[in-house]
Image (cartoon, rainbow, N blue to C red):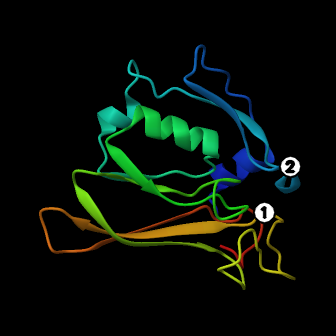
Amino acid sequence: MYTEKVMDHFTNPRNVGEIENASGVGTVGNAKCGDIMRIYLDIDEETKVIREANPDSFGVQEAHWEWMKKLCRYLPEYAYVGVGREDGKKDGEFSAVFYKKDKFEMVSMESFWLSSTPNIPATVYAGSDQSTCPRIATAVVLKPIESESLFLFVNTHADHQGSMAR
């Protein structure tokens, strides 16, 4: 169940403004899902938001291919795994996982759709209360370079309407 604050955001969206000279500007969402918005991202050297947080790994949601390319360009110390939700390649939103190349080795990864046919791109739970948006998950097993332990990172973007896909 979503919090009252999150539900308020979905039912009463607000324009929070623009970032002048943003390093990335794009449209996020899908018209058939009804969640289109213009987003401004500033990940350049001056703000260093991700660099200052310095995570060993992080996940992104609703990142289209143009955003993925920008993140890769600005954050070359990270590798990523994940695919676009519309075709299993580059089309559509990614729920990608980024990880530091010098901290982890990738053991395995898988992308799958939250549907009754998880290996078929762009599928949904037919006949359910799910929105028309396909939902995807990325799972990656990482091995820290200095350890024999394994780390499972799963990133997804839950459906905003349907309980079955959540």
On screen, residue 13 versus residue 100, left or right, reads right
Q: Position of residue 164 (x, y in %)?
A: 72, 79
Pick out the residue farthest to the bottom: 116
Mark 2 belongs to which amino acid?
A: Ala
Q: Name the residue under label 2.
A: 31
Q: Please tell me which of labels 2 and 1 falls first in the chain.
A: 2
Q: Which residue is drawn at 22% across and 50% down?
A: 102
Q: Where is residue 151 in the image (x, y as percent from the top left)?
A: 30, 70
The mark tally for this picture is 2
Q: Quadrant of the C terminus?
A: bottom right
Quick check: 8 above or below 141?
A: above
Q: Which class describes the residues within 10 Å of circle 2: few (<14), some (14-19), or many (20+)?
A: few
Pick out the residue farthest to the top: 20
Mark 1 belongs to which amino acid?
A: Cys
Q: Which residue is drawn at 57% across and 68% down?
A: 137
Name the mark on residue 133.
Answer: 1
Q: Which residue is drawn at 69% across and 33% down?
A: 26
Q: Where is residue 142 in the image (x, y as percent from the top left)?
A: 31, 67
Q: What element carries label 2?
A: helix
Q: Is residue 13 visible?
A: no
